[in-house]
Image (cartoon, rainbow, N blue to C red):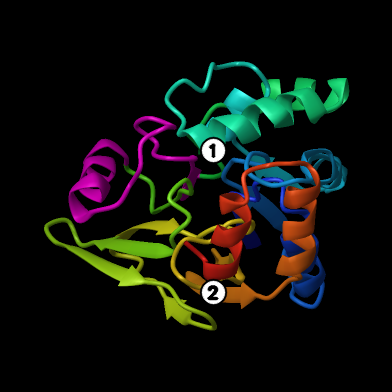
Amino acid sequence: MRYLIVSDIHSNIEAFKSVLSFFKRKKYNKILFLGDLVGYGGAPNQVVDLFRSLNNKVYVRGNHDKVCSGLESGNHFNDKAKIAAIWTYRKLTRGNLNFLKKMPVGPLKVNDDILIAHGSPINEDFYVFSDFDAYQIFVQTRNFITFIGHTHIPLLYEFDGTDIRTLWLSDRMKLSLNPNRRYIVNPGSVGQPRDRDSRASAIIYDDENKKLYTYRIGYNIIKACKKIEKEGLPYHLCTRLHYGV
C-alpha cells in the first residue's frame, strides 16, 4: 500500500490544496495525517472542511487542534500563536469545532509496521529534535516505522539497534529502507515549513517495497498571507511563510 504522509497544515488552504492537487498525479491508497489542521493561518474552516471531505484517511490531533478547539488553554503558547488560537476558536463553525475536539489522540497504530503520532508516541506534545529524543522512542516502541510531525522539519532517523543515523530530507529523494532497521520519519509541514524552504512538504511511503519518496510543492504564499493580514492576525505569521522559518 502507498501512503501520503502529511502534517501541520495550520489553516493554510493554499498550501493544502496545492499538495492535494500535486498528488492527484501520484498513486496512493491512504492519507496519514499527523496533526495540526489549524492554528497560525487565516483559513481554518476551509482547511477543516476540505480535510473532512477526504476519503481513506487516518489521523491524530495536534497541539493546535487541542487549543483551537478549546480542549486546552494554550497558556504555554507564545503570544502570536495564542492570538491566532483565540481567533481560530472564535472563527470555527460548531461542526468543525466538534470535529477537532474528537480527533484521535496519538499514537495510533496504522498496521503492524506503521505508527503515527503528532509530537512523539511517548507524549503527543513532545518535540523530537535530536538523536537522543529519537532514541527514547526507539527503545519504547517495536514497530518498523513511526511517522511524527510537530517540529515542521523533514527528518529521518534510522536505528540499527545500537546507533542512530539522522538524515535531513529534501526535495525528490527516493530512499530504500532497510527491513532489518527501524525508522522515525517527519514529513515536515504542509502549511508552515521551518527548514528555510518555503514550499509545502510531504512524503509518499510504499510499505510493500519499503520506499520513501519526498516532495516539496510550491503554492501561492502571497494569497495565504493576504488571508492572515485581512483577519488582523500577527504579520509575523505571514513573514514566516515567505522564509520558511
Q: Which residues are magenta?
A: 112-141
User: Is 81 a magenta residue?
Assistant: no
Residue underneath mark 1: 80
Residue at the extreme left of the image, as rendered: 162
How far across and how far down the image is residue 57, in percent? 72, 46
Q: List the residue tagged with mark 2.
A: 214
97 displayed left or right of 233: right
Instruction: Report the front residue among 209 and 31.
Output: 31
Q: Amino acid at mark 2?
A: Thr
Circle 1 residues within 10 Å: few <14, some 14–19, many ≥20: some
Q: How many marks?
A: 2
Residue sitting at x 26%, y 66% = 166
Residue 243 image position (x, y, % from top left): 52, 69
For residue 181, side relative to residue 193 (left or right): left
* Residue 206 visible, this angle: yes
Figure check: 135 above or below 21? above
Residue 104 is at least partly visible in this image: no
